[in-house]
Image: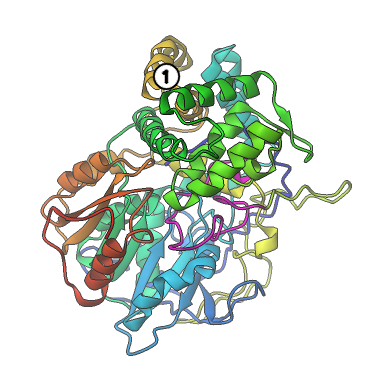
Amino acid sequence: MLSTSRGRALACAATTLALVGAVLPPVAAAAGQDGPSDRDGLSRFYRQQVRWSACPDPAIPADLQCGRVTVPVDYARPDGPTLDVALARYRATGPSRGSVVLNFGGPGGPGILQLAAAGDDFMGLTEGYDVVTFDPRGVGTTSPVTCGGSTARALEAADSGARAADPRAALEELRGAADACARRSGPLLSRIGTVDAARDLDVMRQALGDARLNYLGFSYGTRLGAVYAARFPRRVGRFALDGVDTLTDSLAEQGRAAAQGQQTALDDFLKWCTEDVACAFGQDTRTAREYVQELVRSLDDAPVPTGFGDDLSGQDLVGAIGQALYSKELWPSLSRALAALVEDGDPRAVMGFTAGGVGVPFVPPVRGGAAGAFVPAVRGGTDTPRVPPAGEPAAPSAGASLVPPAGAVPAAAGDAPADGGVVAQEDVPYDNLPAALMAVNCADDPDRPSADRIVRDLGRLRAEYEEASPVFGRYRLAQVLMCYGRPAGTDYIRERVRDVDSARMLLVGTRGDPATPYRWTVETAGRLGPSAVVLDNRGEGHTGYASSECVHRKVDDFLLYGSLPPDGSSCGPAE
């Protein structure tokens, strides 16, 4: 899911894109029908075993272990450059039947920090599994992509295009920003999409020692799971997909659906807010809705100084409100933050939801947890991006490490590769999340309309988005432009992820989900075919596992014991 914002200054310390040229020894391996073979040159990657050890980051819990697995940058060139995918796990507390792999969404969300922060919600799964997550290629500590200052440049240009003050000039800015991203991130940028990430998952599965992949994916993670199931149907174990993504909608259609979903969530929030005399927008829902629209317009015309070297615009406010609407548990905090802004002119609490002006991964809220419990400066976090001190040197430009250093020693068969490719948490570029989010979504989308087509359609699209949401329409329309200037993506997801002949999978859709509308769950289930079983969560918020005891129980029962609920069964809002 592509989320954009006006983008406050993202001063980034660019880090080396450490792609490792380590040579893995060729070894013979028997291949299943959808597994590797000597002929495709991939069998050597499937003979790895993960070596687990203490995680190097002292902020990560001591009982969370870290490891890595090597994959080719380009699966069509298995003898070419490689990279290390960073993994983390909580070990099973009892007899283990293998691993269950988690993906928290995004795209662009680092799995390791999120599991470190929200591990308590998944401890029930350790009764039968090692609970494993990973930073996908290009994300977090796994060879993080970066666009440097062009991330903010792209976000500003996309918003400018959505306003249509000068759409052709905005498109040229986007093309220049895309070129800068390619220079900064190097060859990995063209191989960062979900199809390649799904192939990484299969290498992980084998390195973890599992004949089949057991998997729990949220939001974008459901897209990744669906692609894996289409590519490796015989390797599918127990799959649960929560907050189901679309496999067919274009980015333009996705943005419109997201705007409509967020408007519905905002209306629900305002109805709740106006029942309290402390609501900053009064006690009438219709008046409150008009008040919010006027507040956004006034801040776009005259942004409020924040004291952090940047101003809070109306589009920044829209982004902040959108993040808070992902979980009903955040509504009281949002209400207080808006009251501080409206009544006292204090934007600091609102800024806690802005995620530094970038889109954030769509992750499940921590049940009973506080806002921002997953990752600082991600959803609801209170930290702001660090600005490098004056004179701090930039890291070497990306892409320079594709050639293995002289004298590099090949890894032994069955070993994790020599150190390289995984960077320290403190070296992850500050724009990695939005840079990876844009890169993955663009790699997964085959549509690249011309400048003439975009300019011709922009008026119609603006009207449609405005109708979908007078508050979120412009904010979401910007995403239609974000891939301009980048190579066309794959059509694999739209064309080939269908009628999957795999073990049965559990798909959870939430009726009040502002990010992945319930209809996507139904449509994706239809695409996947008889293997898909739908659980209807009649609640609010994005995803159901962490907010609904009923969903949590049914997902765990399926993953641990293979107990599937009947197709079309439901969880009530109070369950």
Q: Quadrant of residue 78?
A: bottom left
326 is higher (above) or lower (below) than 202: above
Q: Is residue 389 magenta?
A: no
202 is higher (above) or lower (below) than 480: below
230 is higher (above) or lower (below) than 274: below
Q: Which residue is mark 1?
A: 466
- The segment highlighted magenta reads 354-382
Q: Position of residue 318 (x, y in %)?
A: 54, 32
Q: Is residue 374 visible?
A: yes
Label 1, secondary structure: give it. helix
- Disc 1 residue type? Glu
Judged by its main secondary structure, the magenta piece is loop
- Write the residue at 27% across / 60% down: 575
Q: Quadrant location of the N terminus? A: top left
- Write the residue at 43% across / 11% down: 459
Tell me: 72 left or right of 62: left
Q: Position of residue 119 (x, y in %)?
A: 47, 71
- Write the residue at 60% across / 49% down: 432
Q: Position of residue 309 (x, y in %)?
A: 79, 37
Which of 260/265 is in front? 265
